[in-house]
Image (cartoon, helix red, strand yellow):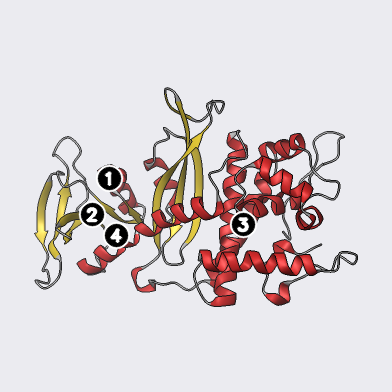
Amino acid sequence: MIGMPPLEARGNRPLQMTFEDQLKALIFFHLEEHPSAQCLLQVLEKDDFARRVIAPQQGIKKSSFAEAINSRGLEQLSYIYQNLQTQAVGTLPKEYDNLGDLIGIDGSLIDASLSMQWADYRKGAKKAKVHLGFDLNRSIPRKIFLTNGKGAERPFACMILSSGQTAVLDRGYQAHDLFDQWQQDNKFYVCRIKASTHKACIETRPINPESNVFYDAIVLLGTPGVNQSKRPVRLVGYTVDGLKYWIATNRYDLSAEQIALIYKLRWEIEKFFAWWKRHLKVYHLIARSEYGLMVQLLAGLITYLLLAIYCREQHNEKVSIKRVRELRIKIHNEMRNANAHTGDLHFQHHGIPCYYASS
């Protein structure tokens, strides 16, 4: 939080919940798997540990909590999220360093209530959509954007991907003009395409007859005069359990088998979404505004990054529910046994993340 923009009250009324209170409450919400805001507030009021360590000193009412979540803290959370990313990049090893800087890109829908008018999806249903870039080398989230459920995914792929990085994408992102633009911008991609896509072969490349790769060539994708790519594309075809995969890429420095491996790694972002939703309850809404939902999502990403750093530094492992459960027990035991009169709650020497340390 050093150098973070200060959170200030609007008008003359003092803050009922400081940013540090807000951050601790949100991390506590995700780490302890609370199913709702009401459950969280009950724990902050009734549980000795939560009331003493997590809740604001004077307690927090439902209206004040809702106001804080839905209207402030986003700038400060973004600051912390970016700094934690920097720390995580320096802490976590690159698992596939020889394959380059791989960024899985995908979207995920969040069920919204009918009162969330901004979360447009279809008649009788409201949904929001997360657009996420995921570092496949370190298994951590990177850039995130939030739209209504009908938000197009391809424009955010451009915003997520930086020069020199390789986007790893499913068929929903296939766009030949986008492939052309990325090649011009020194951006790379490994994208599955539809099998029915028209392919005009320019040059075939040798393949290993002992591998599952059956096709490797330089082609133009799409129908001439309609949607054909202007720049040549490398196309790799391979089979897995009898299913054919067609992968378009502008990575010419790798073997066809390595291209197939990169696309397989795309499933890591799917696994992250599933783990994030199941074990940190990130999609159990405690906010209804677009601003508040982004606050909640950033807090969930911050919690995950803290866990990733903790699991690597303390156990030399990736995040797992086993280690999270151990951490929950350890925190509760040490905090409950702490001296309540002196407030001596600094546990960094035990490896406990500093978000539970007193100021």
Type of the residue with mark 1: Gln
Type of the residue with mark 2: Ala
First in sequence: mark 3 vs mark 1? 3
Mark 3: which secondary structure? helix
Image spot of residue 282 (x, y percent): 55, 48
State how far apart marks 2 and 1 are (Cα): 9 Å
Q: Can you say which quadrant of the picture contains the N terminus?
A: bottom right
Q: Mark 2, residues whose alpha carbon is within 10 Å: few (<14), some, or many (≥20)?
A: many
Residue that mark 1 sits on: 174
First in sequence: mark 4 vs mark 2? 2
Q: Mark 4, residues whose alpha carbon is within 10 Å: few (<14), some, or many (≥20)?
A: many
Q: Residue at x 66, y 37 (%)?
A: 70
Depth check: 143 or 67 in front?
A: 67
State how far apart marks 2 and 3 are (Cα): 39 Å
First in sequence: mark 2 vs mark 3? 3
First in sequence: mark 4 vs mark 3? 3
Circle 2/circle 1 CB separation < 8 Å: yes
Residue that mark 3 sits on: 31
The quadrant holding residue 95 is bottom left
Q: Residue at x 43, y 35 (%)?
A: 151
Left or right: 69 with respect to 192? right
